[in-house]
Image (cartoon, rainbow, N blue to C red):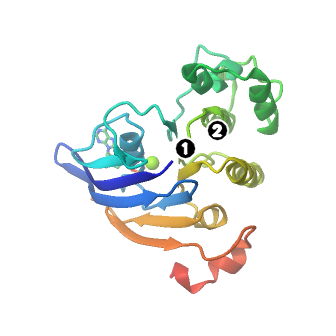
Amino acid sequence: MSLEIHDISKSFEDNHVLSNINFSVKDGEFVSLLGPSGSGKSTLFSIIGGMSQPSGGSIYLDREKINGKRGSISYMPQSSSLFPWRTILDNVVLGQEIAGKVDKEKALEMIERAGLKGYENSYPRQLSGGMKQRVSFIRSLLSPQSLILLDEPFSALDEFTRTKMQKWLLSIWEEHKRSILFITHNIEEAIFLSDRIIILSNKPATVKKEFIIPFDRPRDVNLLLSEEFLT
Ligand code: ADP
Ligand code: MG
């Protein structure tokens, strides 16, 4: 599924956060979005995800203009969106439940793969921040939509777990070729994962720079970091 962001602006009263944002994500593409803290990345995601309205501009999915409800987008917000009264398993299958098709076996397999075996019947309050982040992450992957928005999905993870999750995400993406838009503060992570990187400027944010990663996967990040295109 392709996504086009067309002249999106957003202000909260006199706080101008986004100013004419333009970019696109092609069908099956993995795009990372970077930018300073407070530049409006999460605000942009909540607009794309249909949780808030832009002050101006339009969004197109497969070239069709969308308004309001976003049934075809899976969205993992930056802050935890787990339901405290649901068990981990019931939280994980939520996206499938909404879509009307629950695959419990698959959910349990993903929970195990995420290193959360044994926590299926626990509640979010019994988990650490990093564990809850992985629960939201697998929930968004299990949702059937072909466009996935991930807002700093690995920020609370230790280095070892993060690397494991990055490789897992890449293998899932390569297998199913869903379109992914990914926010991160970590340039190495963006280089390792994405086809293309979009960098936002300071608030009010516009697209400051955009570049394609001109190397095949798997990538040696250390080699890439020395490349001229990053400067
Ligand atoms: P980022 O994700 O890039 O760190 P955010 O999108 O979280 O940035 O925030 C960008 C700006 O938008 C900040 O100045 C923040 O205070 C403001 N903002 C975000 N959400 C709201 C809201 N619901 N009401 C008012 N201001 C908001
Ligand atoms: Mg944010």
Residue 120, image quadrant: top right
Image coordinates of residue 49 in percent, x first then y, are 42, 39
Identified by mark 2, the residue type is Leu
Instruction: Please name the residue that numbered disc 1 is placed on.
Output: 148
- In contact (CB < 8 Å): disc 2 and disc 1: yes
Q: Is mark 1 within 8 Å of ligand 2?
A: no
Q: Position of residue 55 (x, y in %)?
A: 21, 45
Q: Kindly identify which numbered label has been placed on residue 43.
A: none
The residue carrying pointer 1 sits among few (fewer than 14), some (14 to 19) or many (20 or more) residues within 10 Å by Cα, namely: many
- Specify which label sits upstream in the sequence, 2 or 1: 2
Q: Is residue 220 left or right of residue 186?
A: right
Q: Is residue 76 left or right of residue 20?
A: right
Residue at x-position 54% and y-position 52%? 182
Tell me the residue at 75%/21% (across/down).
104
Tell me, yes or no, if residue 203 can be seen here: no
Coordinates of residue 196 in the picture (x, y in percent): 54, 66
Q: Residue visible at 46% across and 31% down?
A: 71
The answer to whether any part of residue 110 appears in the image is yes
Q: Residues within 10 Å of mark 2 (few under 14, many from 20)?
A: many
Residue furthest to the top in view is 85
Q: CA distance from mark 2 to mark 1?
A: 8 Å
Q: Which quarter of the figure has residue 139?
A: top right
Quarter assignment of residue 95: top right
Q: Nearer the viewer, residue 81 or 26?
A: 26
Question: Where is mark 2, residue-wise?
Answer: 141
> Looking at numbered disc 1 in the image, what kind of residue is underneath it?
Ile
x and y percent of residue 4 in the render? 38, 54
Residue 179 vertical placement versus 198 (above, below): above
153 sits left or right of 216 in the view: left
- Residue 184 or 3: which is nearer the viewer? 3
